[in-house]
Amino acid sequence: MTGKPEIQLTEQNFTRRAGRQLALYAVYSLLALIVLVYLLSLVSGGSGLSGSAIDADSNTITISLREEPPQLDSGRATDAASFVVIAHTMEGLLGYDDNSQLVPGVAERWEIREDGATFWLRDNARWSDGKPVTAHDFVFSWQRVVNPATGSEYSFILYSIRNAEAINNGELPVSYLGVRAVDDYTLEVEFERPTPYFEKLAAFSTYYPLREDFFNSTNGRYGADADMLLYNGPYVVSEWVHNASMRWEKNPFYWNDKKGFLDAINVGYITQDVNAKLNLFKDGQIVDTHLVAPMLPSAMEQRWHIQLFMEGTVFFLEFNHRDGRLTDNHHFRKALQLAQDPAELVYKALKEASYLPAPSLFPEFIQGVNGPFRKEYPPPEHRLNLAEARRHLELARQELGLDEFPPLVLLSGDTPVAMVAAEYYQALYKKNLGLDILIDAQIFKQRLAKMTSGDFDIVLAGWGPDYDDALTFGDLFASWNLNNRGRYNNPRMDELVRIAQSSLDPKTRMDAFGEIQQLIYDDAVIIPMYERGWSYVVDPRLKGFKRRSIGPEVDYNYAYIDVDGE
């Protein structure tokens, strides 16, 4: 399994979840709400939906996106919004099927060895202009990713390829990258170190192909607009009105007749407003939407079919470890760590039935040697301890030579959940430690820019799995990982990541991840907040819709219309 499965709202799973919440904080109102949801969900019926969300005659659906994709360059993309679009319009050597299992993509077969890998490409894979996808397109794409001039924040994910890291550090030319096109349809890869999980990496979007002649024709604007892209996936972006809408149309040159069943997908709305999307779904204008807790009674009044999905994304407070920041001080970070309790955030502030308190950077679904990682390597036990928190704060004040602490800047998104969390920590740290927190709430694109530039003391951040291995979380705070936005730098962390990257022994790898988990807590690298789940509804006439832990968070590649689904 690559993630937790979708589940119905049933009496068993809701009672179990609500019982845990009740035992902790006696949240009677939430329990009553959940019981109401369950009882009403027993009543099945039609959706009551009408409108333009589904047009069976044209085989078209209308959806919404939460955010405007900053750009659609698969070699530079880092955000969930871009990944959703890219996953529908591009394809790598491998992909994931309807059951979340790795399957052939552009590569029809492959071989992973200790020293490298070979991929044999299918000869019927085509770009959206009808030209073949070749091994040369992968060589060009990967060389561009590791080229330091590109500035790819995901360049680290190619470091298992020979010389990739040295090239990315400016020590070697890109031609030294350990990948070559033996011929048009054979791709040979040399490893820097043994990488038995390389096939999982090869399915990630940073590994997608890019055709050199088309890229050069865009004059530096590749991925910025619909006509600045070339596609090899099930759909093409035929229209892109920035910050407003998109249209994806079926790619006539796509090779796989088991994906891409719709003739078009209209992204009719780009908005984070969950109330607006609820009304759009109610009016039959979009085919699916997620729900927050206050919406459940209204949703059940409509007799909608509510589902839950734990997607594996972990959210956390990330500290800025750069020189000159208060948060670079270990005692200061420990003070903030010990003065909070993630269970209180989840159950008293956010009150989302589909969220779980996060005791670790590693989510529940990550596997260890013989079972769940967190069962084999229990996270450090955390307890709210104000006396110890205040002791660390005083030590920090003395080390920093301050009479009093200046205000801290907490960078946040502008979504309702982000604002509740930011205001919760603002009040919490004022009450428990006397610290002043200034909230810097930014739209999605601007928040990413500020995270990248280090313009924050603390940021509300999150990380979802890129591939089905503990390393997708375990290497996040390696010094070379540009997604390490706070620039945490610890030689022991880097050493442990290297072990996890290269060892062929599963126990050795998991021991390294266990120590990484402990180090993150001991050094207060971050403060884990919650693991996200989704409550959501889908028009019953749309079949094959997926939410995923690995891959795009919403997936319409296998979706199709069934007018009898009502």
Image: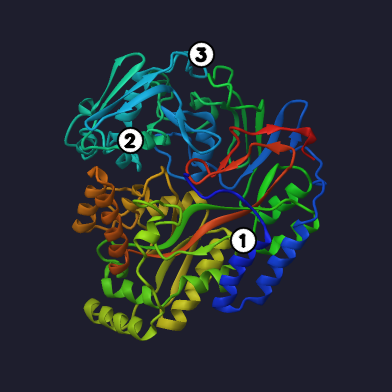
Mark 1 vs mark 2, foreground winner is 1
Q: Is label 3 in contact with label 1 (beta carbons under 8 Å)?
A: no
Q: Tell me the CA gap for discs 1 and 2.
A: 36 Å
Residue 432, position as x, y percentages in the image: 43, 82
Q: Which residue was labeled with disc 2? A: 198
The amino acid on which the numbered mark 1 sits, given as a three-letter code, is Asn
Q: Which residue was labeled with disc 3? A: 130
Q: Is label 3 in contact with label 2 (beta carbons under 8 Å)?
A: no
Regarding residue 223, the answer to whether it shows in the image is no
Q: Which residue was labeled with disc 1? A: 13
Q: Is residue 20 left or right of residue 538?
A: left
* SS class, disc 2: helix
Q: Tell me the CA gap for discs 3 and 1.
A: 49 Å
Q: Earlier in the sequence, mark 1 or mark 2?
A: 1
Q: Using the rendered view, name the quadrant where residue 145 is placed.
A: top left
Mark 3 vs mark 1, foreground winner is 1
